Amino acid sequence: MTDLRDTILDSMRQVALISDCTLVDDIDDDTVLLQSGLDSLGFAMLVAQLEEEFNVDPFSEMELAVYPRTLGEFVSVYQSALQPSE
């Protein structure tokens, strides 16, 4: 999960730079997404960038909408979406 988490954090940093946002220091799995420094447009850009990176948008593929509250929950959504189907 560390590689996935690192990829997501790198994408967050890129989006923050593009959208002129400032991320909080020391983002960890317990960081509340709405307090990370990205605004709603930033999160939309992040999901779009991650869709390009992983070729999956887990939020559009969900039967029931899930809104992750923390970075750890956000990473878990992607981790679940990237696991091969059984």
Image: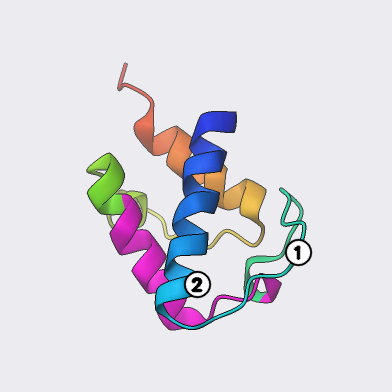
For the magenta stretch, what is the residue range?
35-50
Dominant SS of magenta comes to helix
Q: Earlier in the sequence, mark 1 or mark 2?
A: 2
State whether residue 15 is above or below residue 70. below
Q: Quadrant of residue 82?
A: top left
Image disc number at residue 16: 2
Question: Residue at image x 55%, y 81%?
Answer: 21
| Left or right of 83, for residue 38 | right
Tell me the distance, in whole angstroms, between the alpha carbons under discs 1 and 2.
Answer: 13 Å
- Specify few, some or many for label 1: CA neighbours under 10 Å numbering under 14, 14-19, or 20 or more: few
Q: Magenta stretch containing residue 49, yes or no?
A: yes
Quadrant in which the C terminus appears: top left
- Between 41 and 82, the one lying in front of the other is 41
Q: Mark 2 Cα within 10 Å, few/some/many (few <14, many 20+)? A: many
Q: Secondary structure at mark 2?
A: helix
Residue that numbered label 1 is attached to? 25
Residue 27 % position (x, y): 72, 57
Of the pair 55 and 61, the residue shown nearer to us = 55
Q: Residue at x 70, y 74 (%)?
A: 35
- Residue type highlighted by circle 2: Ala
